[in-house]
Amino acid sequence: MVLMRDLVVQAVQMVLVLALSPLLMGFVRKCRAHLQRRRGASVFQPYRDLVRLLRKEVVLAENASWLFRAAPYLIFAATWVAAALVPTFAVGLKFSWSADLIAIVALLGSARFFLALAGLDVGTSFGGIGSSREMMIASLAEPAMIMMAFTLALVAGSTQLGTIAATLTFAHVGLRVSLGLALVALVLVAVAENGRIPVDNPSTHLELTMVHEAMVLEYSGRHLAMIELASQLKLLLYFSLIGCVFVPGGLAAAESGFFSYLIGAGAYVAKLAFGGALLAIFETATAKMRVFRVPDFLGAALMLGFLGTLLLFVSRTL
Amino acid sequence: MTALPVDPVYLILCVPLAGAGLLALLPDYRWSARLNVLVSLLSFCSALLLFVRRPSTGLFLQIDDLNIVFVVLNTFVAFTTSIFSASYIAHELETGRLTPVYLRFYHAMFQFMMFGMNLALVANNIGLMWVAVELATLTTILMVGIYRTHEALEAAWKYFILGSVGIALALFGTILIYMTAQPVIGTGLPAMAWTELFRHAASFDPSLLNLAFVFLLLGYGTKVGLVPLHAWLPDAHAEGPTPISAVLSGLLLNVALYAVLRFKMLLAANTRTFAPGPLLIALGLLSLIFAAFMLYRRRDIKRLFAYSSIEHMGIIAFAFGMGGPLANFAGLLHMTMHSLTKSAIFFSVGHIAQVKGTQKIADMGGLSVTHPALAWALVIGVVAIAGFPPSGIFMSEFLVVSSTFARAPALAVALVFGLLIGIGALFLRLGGIVFGEPRGNVAPDQASYLPFLAHLTIVLIAGLYIPLPVVSWFQSVARQLG
Amino acid sequence: MHSFSFDVAHLLAGSLVLVSFVMLYQDRMYALINTFALHAVLLALSVAWQAFVQDAPHLYVTAVIALIFKATVIPAALRRIVERLKIHREIETVVGIGLTMLAGIALVALSTVVMLKVTAAADPLAREDLAFALSIVLLGLLMMVSRRNAVGQVIGFMSLENGLVLAAAGAKGMPLVVEISVAFSVLIAFIVIGIFLFRIRERFDSVDIGALDSFRGDRG
Amino acid sequence: MTLALTLWGAGGLLALSVLAALARGARFFSAIVYGMTLAISAVLLVAAATHIGDPPAERVLPIGLPWLGAHFHTDALALFFLAVVNLGGSTASLFALGYGRHEAEPARVIPFFPAFLAGMNLVVIAGDAFTFLSAWEFMSLSSWALVVSHHRDPSNIRAGYIYLLMASFGTFCLLLAFGLLAGAGGGYSFAAMHVHHAPILAAFVLLLALLGAGSKAGLVPLHVWLPLAHPSAPSHVSALMSGVMTKVAVYAFIRIVFELLGPPAWWWGVAVLAIAGITAVLGVLQALMEHDLKRLLAYHTVENIGIIFIGLGLALAFRANGMALAAALAFTAALLHVLNHSVFKSLLFFGSGAVLAATGQRDMERLGGLIHRMPQTAFAFLVGAAAISALPPLNGFVSEWLTFQAIFLSPSLPQWGLRLLVPTVGAALALSAALAATCFVKAFGVTFLGRARSAEAAASVETDRFSRGAMFALASLCLLLGTLPGLAIDWISPAAVELVHGHMPAQRSISWLTIIPVAQSRSSYNGLLVFLFITASTLLAIWAIHTFASRAARRAPAWDCGTPSSSPLTQYSAASFAQPIRRVFGNVVFRARENVTMPPPGDTRPAALAVELHDVPWEVLYAPIAQAVSYTAGQLNALQFLSIRRYLTLVFFALILLLLGTAIWS
């Protein structure tokens, strides 16, 4: 019976993240539109886009290889699995122990790996630009992420997201400098990894400034849909990550009743909405930076994460 | 076995002497080459007889633990060298570098030189040993000059002048030894007999012994080729016939070193002398490092390996200078292995120089393409001499370095430094000779690999397994050396 | 008797050293050769004196060898070579004569110090002889080093041998073997040198070692 | 039992090499040789892998040092490395069965290949200093012969030369280390070295071991020979050198420092960790700047050796503080990475060898689009690339994950030095992992994807079945080790018990084959489930889309923002791919300079961009040494050309000096 319930919870979570991620994207866009005094498309526009893409036929470049066709599904799958393992409305998911925070970061890494390869596959210059910049950004963002993970792991004495969330929720950790640093680092990384302003502009097609769009330039139809969905999942993942770690309020405990699950879900949606609004404001308020200023941006993230870890190594109480 | 008609120790002296006489008379060089091989074989066999029946020690001649294996080694290398020279010297006639007359002289001198060396090894009398060493030296001088080219004559002249100064210094040392022994042992022959000297060494005047050792070290050290007394050695090796280079490196250096060893034992027997160790260590390290650096700029292949001989003499001197059972064992092993390996290298170098028609390293590239057998022979030889397993030299170097480091780290580091420099130079040149696109002559070679194979097999086996009798011999001598 | 014999030996050996100095001083060919002859004569005398003192008859042989061979034959031969090869008559030295002399004095001092310190136990006769012999050897070596001319170097070498003979004679009861061998080696040495000079004569116009060294080995 | 088998195997290999030498490398013979080596090393692999739990065995043969004999022994550590060696040996032989046919002069390869294998096997089972060093040096020598086997290219000769020098240097360092351990008495057997050593002496031994084993393993700054020598050899040998020989060096380090040297001091960990961190980062950065495929792989070997030594350094630190469990975790992580790296590095070198055989090219800038003509090779290489980039669910990730877990345990270390260093090293580890991913996107993308950049690349064909067999065997092993790491951990644990006196919790008892380094609450990872999830959701997505959405597809020219170019040269090249990274790290690490010559408007001259990179370790450390040696040689060389009189002067002064000495002495 318990097993049944756990499985259900896990399944619900998987479906939930899949269902919510386009909505989140649409919400963020809507907020930006409002901030820019536009009416903007409806919050459900992303769903419509996905459906439209899925209906379209795929146009493959002449020398696209099997890798090019397989990549979207792999990317989607890896991101989805990663997103499904981050506690959203409840901790103690059935399979959360099968991959800890580092593994989740690495899963996102493998998704990125294949995306970058796909960018190189057709053999165009833009794909190359995209891949190389994406990997450059990642090669700085990932260590920052790991450092952030270090900080959390040292605070919570575990790298299991469930345990971390639980610790931060129910054990009274209190305010900590290192956690603050970790939060900032995580936000910076999230901005970079999801290709948001100021690192990358998701809605641009100015060739020389784009990163993510350049990689997927050759994709169309269902493949593009998969990739879009994957990137929306990724955004959601980072939101729920920040949510469950730094604002764990409302998170349902393991094996708690149906009611608390409902509360958890509500809290989760609220968090997403709040975060999305914040992101929109941030994006409207800042300008896109030159590609070669990005390393400084991420270097700052890396340094902050490192500082947080170091503080914990030096004294367990900070 | 006591039914032996004549004492083998006389055999190993008389056979070469008689051979020399015969060869001097024999006009046809083919026969003389064969006879040369035969005579060397005979003296080798008679040397083997020494194991069967250890002759009694006389006032002039003796066979003891120290010299018996040197005698055997000596005659063995002489034998293989004579085979090599048989296949080598014919070519010299074809190219007209030698005339039959000189060839006759060459063969006679070869045996005469062997006589000198054997005598030096078995002499029980420091005076007699001195005479014998000088005899060997003078004959080699004549051999080195035998091509009568400008370079050969100058090499021989250099060898001669420096050698005779060495002669003088060694003689002075010998006289000093006698002066030391005479008050204790009394006047006359006994005061020059090794056996007597060792018996009474403890009561000799130490400071006079020290002085004597200085002169003997410099005198015989000149033959050993220790820096800074080495100047004759590279040119003599480079300009003489290759068999003589092999004999020089393989035997004469050993004989001279044997003399030094004897006197070191004498000093070791007297507790109040300052240890000759520091002298040997200093000269050894100097020779090693200097020769190692000199290897880099060599353009003549025989001179290259001549310097490598200096390097190894340095290592040996260093080992004996360190003393102690391990280091002495290593020194003796290194002596044996070096003479075998180095002569083997000279065998292959001789053939290489013949097929290439030059000794200039620059003119012999890509040998492994044109003459694979010769090339790999050279590679194996160099690998062995550089102290890679499974060569016996690896074992000796292993023992020297490891036993030194625990006692005097700085010295061991200096030793390792020298060895590394040397390896670097050797393989730098080797790569140029053996690999790459072929250069120079590609004439086929008619070499005989028997001598080479014999030596290298022994060396490579010795790196893995040394028969117990040899080991116990080495160990007992090492103990005497203190 | 003892003191007297000691003084005579001392005198002779000392005068040998003196003559070595004179040789160091000489820079004319013939004068050098003559001085060497004198050196040999003195050697013969002192060896003979040793023979007399130790009443070891075989030493007389050595003395005679020295007298005939070194004092007469070799100088004559050298003169002929000098004429035959038209070697120019003055010997160029490496450093100035004065400096060479100073070095020689230093050498003599060194050898006496070494010897006197060394053989405090041995009898004074042998000891003095050895001291002088050593200084003669060193002076001979110095001469070989400081002369650019082959003949000069040969003479230096032979004066060195003289020192050896003196030492050998001083060593009480040293078997004949040694003297023979010394003479023997000197003989061989000289014959071979002669052969070489001859061959070299065939090839070059001078026996000046400088020319010999034109070849330095391993160039190019 | 395993010991005797190994000895016989080594003997067989040596005999085989002798036979090969006698056969003068007749073509038909190469198949025989590789077949035999495959058989022998497969047998040894099985024997070692199955008997790792056995009690130590010792055997003395009457060879080697006369009074000592040749000691051979096997314990868990030796058996583990024996397995690694023979795993590499068997796969390399299998690969060579096909690849060897492309060999121009087999006579220069097949005699030395078995000898090389024999050498590595003997090093691992050697039980005394002399046997160890003989085998060690023999291994170097035979691999040198293999490096110079393609001798017509002067750069290979140079590579071999530098390799041999560094190898001798390393051997001498180890020799000195053993000299210290054995003492003046000459107790050369490892058993006799188990005495307590004075701290200062132990420090020297540690230093010498770092120099000796490190120079073979490729620790910065002793790594310079590695990217030269490994690529010069035939590819199956490169795989052995990179994947296996460096591990033998790791074995030497473990044997000396963990066993012979006795209980460690805490600062040993500091020394090892510092060097290891630098090695990891510098190795991967240099790999990123490299466009020669095989050399790029060689630089990655440097990086991974760094990762392995991070594990070892942590193990030392923990052990010095008596934290057995943590030490076991770090040590297991290191050993597991040894195994993993040998697997995927061999795989990658095989792939590069297949590419080399098919196109004759090692330069990535002249490759591209191979995935169309060599799909299977491309797939295998892709797996290897993903594995070395530490991507789940493959094996590279597991060992790095374990290393991270070990790092998480380090805050409880008492020493400040370690507390400050360990997180830094962790950052270095994370950085190098991320950069490795970047580098292999470059390597795979430029080599196999895109359009062919040269005629050879365009004309390439899929490689032979033996090579493919070897590659797929290793690729599946990558997946297996990645999904079932628990079994590997349990398999390693005897070695950990032996050397750090602790072991991780037994993993096979845990449900779902999860691995739990310390405790369930702390951290756990289940490669199998992750793999299953990914596969499931991929299939789900494909199924859903192909049933509910369109499956129509059409081929058309590339879009490329409407400006597609027909010339393959307009693709992103390896250099341009690495350019952002070079911008970020180059100035510091490589003293990189970009010289742009931009003609003024109207000028028809083309603009030019020249990039100069510096190999700093070489220029700072090695070039000066080489210059010094050559200068000294030049100066001393004057002594060859003196006149006789001057030589006499030398003798004269020597005499005077010694006389003065005696005068002063007594």
Image (cartoon, coloured by chain):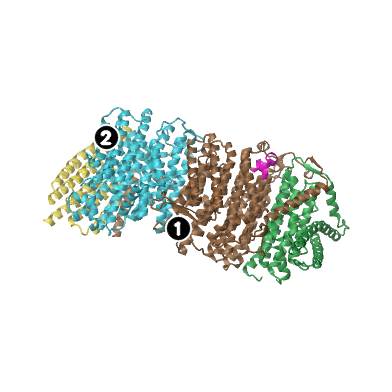
Chain colours: A green, B cyan, C yellow, D brown
Which element type, helix, strand or loop, lies under badge 2? helix
Q: Please give the residue where the numbered disc 1 appears in the rendered image.
A: D191
Residue C121, percent from left and from top: 20, 59
Is the stretch drawn in magenta largely helix, strand or loop?
Answer: helix
Q: Is residue A260 visible?
A: yes
Residue lying farthest to the left in this orientation: C1
Q: Residue at x 86, y 54 (%)?
A: A45
Residue A8, percent from left and from top: 78, 60
Write down the quadrant of residue D34 in the picture: top right
Q: Residue at x 63, y 52 (%)?
A: D481
Q: Which residues are magenta?
A: D364-379
Q: Is residue D378 magenta?
A: yes
Residue D569, percent from left and from top: 70, 41
Give the CA separation, mark 2 to mark 1.
57 Å
Which element type, helix, strand or loop, lies under badge 1? helix
Write down the quadrant of residue B354 in the picture: top left
Q: Please give the residue where the numbered disc 2 appears in the rendered image.
A: B20
Which quadrant holds the N terminus of chain B? top left
Q: How many marks?
A: 2
**Nearer to the camera, D314 or D580:** D314
Residue D610, percent from left and from top: 65, 46
Q: Which mark is residue D6?
A: none
Q: Give the crowd class for mark 2: few <14, some 14-19, many >=20 residues within 10 Å.
A: many
